[in-house]
Image (cartoon, grey):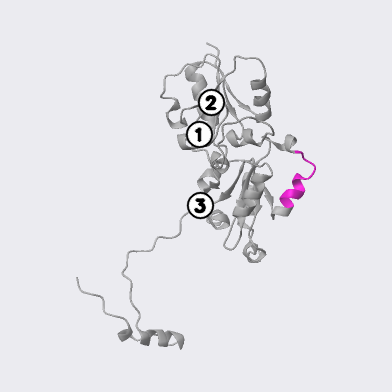
Amino acid sequence: MVPVSAAELRAQALQKLLAGPGPHPVLVDIRPNFQFKKGSLPGAINVEGRILLERKMKFSRGCILLSDGIADKVDVADLASKLAAKTGVQVDYLYGGVPAWFELSGVSGTAKKGATLGQSSTTLTYEDLKNRTGGVCFVDCRSEEEKAVPEGHKCPVKGFCDLRKFSYCPDMADFHRRQKGKTRAQRAGEGPLIVLITAKGTEAGKDLQRLYVQGYRRCSMLIGGAEVIKVDGRRGKMRGASRNIKVDEKTLQNIAGNKPPTTNSLPETPKK
């Protein structure tokens, strides 16, 4: 039997395919059911990616996998290849997932009123990004003070971008300058995943909402911001188990006067 491959399908190509004469491939939305209920492509069925290969399903016309497109918990390309090998039919996957479809102007969907932001993830973890090798644009929403790094050091976000060939915009204004001249039809379903780098005091949530109003659907915020990139996703050092020591008033006065606390300032450790 000739091996069947899996192919990446762009949103505009899928739009033309579905507008043409049938029969069409089966659309399989592999996201969790709660996301599927908030909006998907017309006619799509929902089978979560983690159980798709276990299900006995026949796709005589082939099928197209629809994913979250932002924080996928499964490797969609790998899943498509395995499903193609199992079924012997063509299995494609939509580039950018469901959000890429909703970027197209005038497309039909099943999104319910008020559920637009629920169609996909609005936050990303470091784990969602660390293995990607491209297709991501970071927009730095931090203040200038928060972006500052010691002399001789590299910005953790820029270094992360250089390593994985991600693009980087120092602020939202720079992102819009790069998009100038591109119509919505030209960028819809084709652009990179937009990741906002946040920090304390920033209003990235409003930036995310503005991008959404402007037609961008593949945009999200990175949990932990630049700090999680700086430590390469590692958690901080775990503190050893210890009891909390209550410091009395005399100790506080000694500390305020830059005097070392006396040995009698701290309560004795209770005997076990």
Q: Residue at x 40, y 84 (%)?
A: 252
157 lies above or below 113: below
Q: Which residue is mark 1?
A: 36
Which image quadrant: the C terminus? bottom left
Q: Which residue is mark 3?
A: 233
Please tell me whether the stretch drawn in magenta is mainly helix, strand or loop: helix
Q: Work out whether mark 3 precedes mark 2 in sequence or the reverse, and give the earlier one.
A: 2
Q: Work out whether mark 1 precedes mark 3 in sequence or the reverse, and give the earlier one.
A: 1
Determine the CA span between mark 1 and mark 3. Answer: 29 Å
Q: Residue at x 67, y 18 (%)?
A: 20
Q: Nearer the viewer, residue 78 or 203?
A: 203
Q: Amino acid at mark 3?
A: Gly
Q: Which residue is mark 2?
A: 44
Residue 194 appears left or right of 39: right
247 lies above or below 63: below
Q: Amino acid at mark 1?
A: Phe
2 lies above or below 211: above
Q: Residue at x 62, y 49 (%)?
A: 209
Q: Write down the region rendered in magenta.
A: 174-183
User: Badge 3, how many Cα within 10 Å: few under 14, some, many 20+?
Assistant: some
In percent of width and height, residue 254 lies at 41, 87
In percent of width and height, residue 40 lies at 55, 32
